[in-house]
Every structure is written in structure tokens, then in C-alpha cells.
Image (spheres, rainbow, N blue to C red):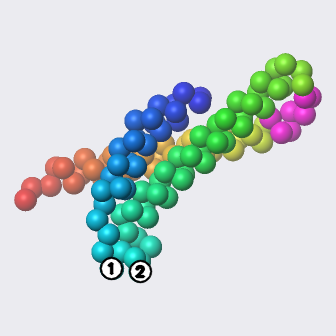
Amino acid sequence: MAMDITALYNVSSGAVKEAAKLAPTTKADTYTDTSFNHLLSTAIDNINTTNSYLSDAENEEIKWALGETENTHDLSIALQKASTALQYTVAIRDKLLEAYKEIMQMQI
């Protein structure tokens, strides 16, 4: 499960960070929350949060497997958080790819 988001993060993170650096900022962008740079930084934060949840779930699994804890409640919460975050991230990625494909099919 952690491999999926890591692959997504590795593929998109570098490109997203570079695009955020190169994104021009105008005076209008500094006053609105919908600037391209803000959207990219929010996307990166969401990916990092998802990755954090996946790491926490993996750590809880390891603790439980090694017998360091018998608290299955924490394990199930961590797994559910990771699952929900990953589903959300993948859904957003799919919507962005769908929008990109639609834009690319537009005739000028």
C-alpha cells in the first residue's frame, strides 16, 4: 500500500515543485487563494499528509506484528486513515488527469 503513494509522490513531486518555482506570480495572485502556486503547494501538502498516514499505518503494523503492542484499536485507526487518504489522493489525481485529457482534446 505504501508503494502506491510513494510512486505517485516520486513521479509528481519533483515536477510539481519545479512548476511551483517557475509559476509566475502577479499582483492579483498575491490577493487570491486560487493562484497556481497556492494550488500546487496545497497538492504537495496533501501528498505529504497521505504519505505520513501511510508511514504511521506501516509502523503500527510492524509494532503489532512484533508484539510490541496488543492495541488493535490504534492499528485499525491508522489503517483506516491511510486508506481514506490514499483513496482521496488517487481520486484527485484521476480527476486532474481526466481534466488534462479533456483540455488536450479541445480544438483551437
Residue at which label 2 appears? 31
In magenta segment, residue 39: no
Tell me the residue at 53%/46% (across/down): 47
Disc 2: CA contacts within 10 A as few (<14), some (14-19) or many (>=20): few
Tell me the residue at 69%/44% (across/down): 81
Which label number is shown at residue 8? Answer: none
Indicate the secondary structure of the residue bearing disc 1.
helix
Tell me the residue at 45%/35% (across/down): 10
Q: Is residue 101 left or right of residue 42?
A: left
Identify the amino acid type marked 2. Answer: Tyr
> Can you give x and y, in whole percent of width and height, for residue 91 in the image?
47, 46
> Can you give x and y, in whole percent of width and height, for residue 48 in the image?
56, 46
Rounded to the nearest angstrom, the CA distance separating label 1 from label 2 is 7 Å
> Can you give x and y, in whole percent of width and height, for residue 96 in the image?
36, 50
Q: In which quarter of the image is the N terminus?
A: top right
Identify the amino acid type marked 1. Answer: Lys
Front-most of 76 and 15?
A: 15
Residue 31 figure quarter: bottom left
- The residue most toward the right is 70
The residue segment tinted magenta is: 69-75
Answer whether labels 1 and 2 touch (C-beta < 8 Å): yes
- The residue most toward the left is 108
Tell me the residue at 74%/30% (across/down): 59
Residue at which label 1 appears? 27
Q: Is residue 13 left or right of residue 71?
A: left
In magenta segment, residue 73: yes
Indicate the secondary structure of the residue bearing disc 2.
helix
Residue 82 figure quarter: top right
> Can you give x and y, in whole percent of width and height, for residue 99 in the image?
30, 53
Disc 1: CA contacts within 10 A as few (<14), some (14-19) or many (>=20): few
Q: Quadrant of the C terminus?
A: bottom left
